[in-house]
Image (tube, coloured by chain):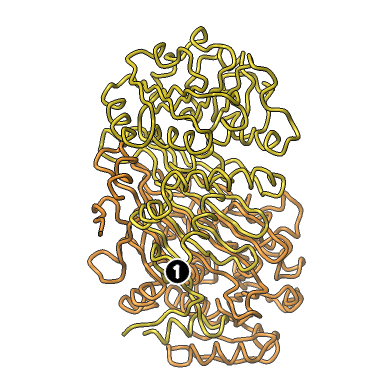
Chain colours: A orange, B yellow
């Protein structure tokens, strides 16, 4: 017996395998530049969105979070976990998947892996911040922390800001080696560094993406020169920060969504009323970004639901007329909506 | 090119089609009796669970909700929409799907349709409440509202409480006809009624499951006799109630999770401190349920995340060694967890 689902009942599903094929069919740098544009587009209409801090379920070893948002026409949410101990067990620290739905019917219209997609959108988000906050003639980036996120940061900054001179540093030289090897043939000038000072000296942009709490003392205040832009993206949960408090104190701080960043970001070290600028207001032009060549700007990025929404909408548009998804039978679709029981009974 | 996902990356998916096959392989009454036992089991250890009111995103035409919970070992959430106008457009008012995950790793272990499963667990939940609250010699149920949920209510009450004498009433006689036809060969004594009085007169249990706001005046106070147990399950969102205020006022009210029921249930008509008993305390024996033969007991059911958790865990156990699921490639699983980029690059 085969029950045929009606087209209404079908939801496109993008697996990890198909997400990777989609990325390669578009080109990873183009994909990230597109994502950056989608994020900018949505940040520019920030006030339209339903916003809420993510809903976390914490345990001793990690957290599972739901991150929903809506622009009134589409609704999206991401499921994401964070389990630092997973890596030692050969598992991903972060895995994710997400759904896009039609607000008018409530029906899901896309179900997608988001482990890979989140890695790309996190790179794209830092690139958007860097584009709007770094010195316009920035040429060099220090990439501190060379783990799973590092290559995505470098590629996005290259695709969006044209920065391709990269210095790599990690407390684990193996991580630096891996990152350098992955980036070797992708159009960068790579310098692998053995001290953080070597990486940071003269860099226009510093991107910090560390997974380890012990890393937080690496970047001390006296290393950070005037005029630098910092992306701090690894400190993204309560109790986890990457920068010395003094660096935060002397920077102009830009954030995604203050109620979430005050709990999860670098500014959790600061008083509750520490001044922050919302990045969307810089993008719309309502608030200035960098106001002088000597200012230190800090993007205190924790990842917000709207970025995932932008990424899901982009994937939904891109998979059209491609073989990079399969339809799955997720929604019951009885002939008579009042007769769900009859549908089940007849299937017997 | 085919990229083989590793077993770790695979998540079992239960489609609508496979859920119906699973139900028929177990038997729908057995399935609902099992669900009732799972719900009782979880209500009995209520205090272990992470509890939070559902997270809703409201629009002019409906709501999309996420309902998460966790017992510390497993985490579950349901996505569910509520769009009353959908039915006129040939769509389901309510569709749902859900996920079960391992708290220790954060990895999802089940992705399942829940439109069908929610219909069954909602019936099972009312049956649990009826078992603990109705008069022990209850024999007759009036089923008010003969829409998509009505057959599930009747079957669950039969499976769990042995009540098989059913009176059906709906403002739309076609709905009653559909419900009667669906139940005709399933071991009930069915009376179709043309007035609510006819259905309710002498009934031991009254179950009200209406989708329409206009129904709420059907059940007036003078119809409800002493000793009756009422399941009110259709009023499940702000602004939607089914019972006249006077009925609520003279009943002993039992609820799932007070912070949610006070917003969504029948008791939204009452003062904020209207006394309620949590059903889980009746199940553990901490609080008495019915205390006299003449008491009117009211289960003000709105549906809570723990019921979905129970249902997902049951399905997860039941699909083992069956053909009623397929594995989907939802989780990226690089050989080296720090080398997500390398995995993507090598797929090119």
- Residue that carries the numbered disc 1 in the rendered image: B330
Host chain of mark 1: B
Is label 1 in a helix, a strand or a loop? loop
Q: Residue furthest top?
A: B222
Q: In the displayed structure, would residue A271 be above or below residue B29?
A: below
Across and down, in percent, residue A294 comes to 64, 70
Q: Is residue B183 left or right of residue B252?
A: left
Q: In the displayed structure, would residue A287 be above or below residue A162?
A: above
Across and down, in percent, residue B67 comes to 54, 46
Residue drawn at x 46%, y 83% as measured from the top left: B343
Q: Is residue B180 left or right of residue A51?
A: left
Q: Is residue B6 left or right of residue A90?
A: left
Q: Is residue A284 visible?
A: no
Q: Is residue B345 visible?
A: yes
Q: In the displayed structure, would residue A187 be above or below residue B313?
A: below
Q: How many marks?
A: 1
Q: In the displayed structure, would residue B73 be above or below residue B173?
A: below
The residue lying toward the viewer, choosing from A194 and B219, is B219
Across and down, in percent, residue B201 comes to 45, 12
Rendered image quadrant of residue A106: top left
Across and down, in percent, residue B278 comes to 67, 33
Residue drawn at x 43%, y 59% as measured from the top left: A40
Residue drawn at x 69%, y 63% as measured from the top left: A266
The residue lying toward the viewer, choosing from A276 and B119, is B119
Image quadrant in which the N terminus of chain A is located: bottom left
**Tag 1: Cα neighbours inside 10 Å, few (<14), some, or many (≥20)?**
many
């Amino acid at each position: 017996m085969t029950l045929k689902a009606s087209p209404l009942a079908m939801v496109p599903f993008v697996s990890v395998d198909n997400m990777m094929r989609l990325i390669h069919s578009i080109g990873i740098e183009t994909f990230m530049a597109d994502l950056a544009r989608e994020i900018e587009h949505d940040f520019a209409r920030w006030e339209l969105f339903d916003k809420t801090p993510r809903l976390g379920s914490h345990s001793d070893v990690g957290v599972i979070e739901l991150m929903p948002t809506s622009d009134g026409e589409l609704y999206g949410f991401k499921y994401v976990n964070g389990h630092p101990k997973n890596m030692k067990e050969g598992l991903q620290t972060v895995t994710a998947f997400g759904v896009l739905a039609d607000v008018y019917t409530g029906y899901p219209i896309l179900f997608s892996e988001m482990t890979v997609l989140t890695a790309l959108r996190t790179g794209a988000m830092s690139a958007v911040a860097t584009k709007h906050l770094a010195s316009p003639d920035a040429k060099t980036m220090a990439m501190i922390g060379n783990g799973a996120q590092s290559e995505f940061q470098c590629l996005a900054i290259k695709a969006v800001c044209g920065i391709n001179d990269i210095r790599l540093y990690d407390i684990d030289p193996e991580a630096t080696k891996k990152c350098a090897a992955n980036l070797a043939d992708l159009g960068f000038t790579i310098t692998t560094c053995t001290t953080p000072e070597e990486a940071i000296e003269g860099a226009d942009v510093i991107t910090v993406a560390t997974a380890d709490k012990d890393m937080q003392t690496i970047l001390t205040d006296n290393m950070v020169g005037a005029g630098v832009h910092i992306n701090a993206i690894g400190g993204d949960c309560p109790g986890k920060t990457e920068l010395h408090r003094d660096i935060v104190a002397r920077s102009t701080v830009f954030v995604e969504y203050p109620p979430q960043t005050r709990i999860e970001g670098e500014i959790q070290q600061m008083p509750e009323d520490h001044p922050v600028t919302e990045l969307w207001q810089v993008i719309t032009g309502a608030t200035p970004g960098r106001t002088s060549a000597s200012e230190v700007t800090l993007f205190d990025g924790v990842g917000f639901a709207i970025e995932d929404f932008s990424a899901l909408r982009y994937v939904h548009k891109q998979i059209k007329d491609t073989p990079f998804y399969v339809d799955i039978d997720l929604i019951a679709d009885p002939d008579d909506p009042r007769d769900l029981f009859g549908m089940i009974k007849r299937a017997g």
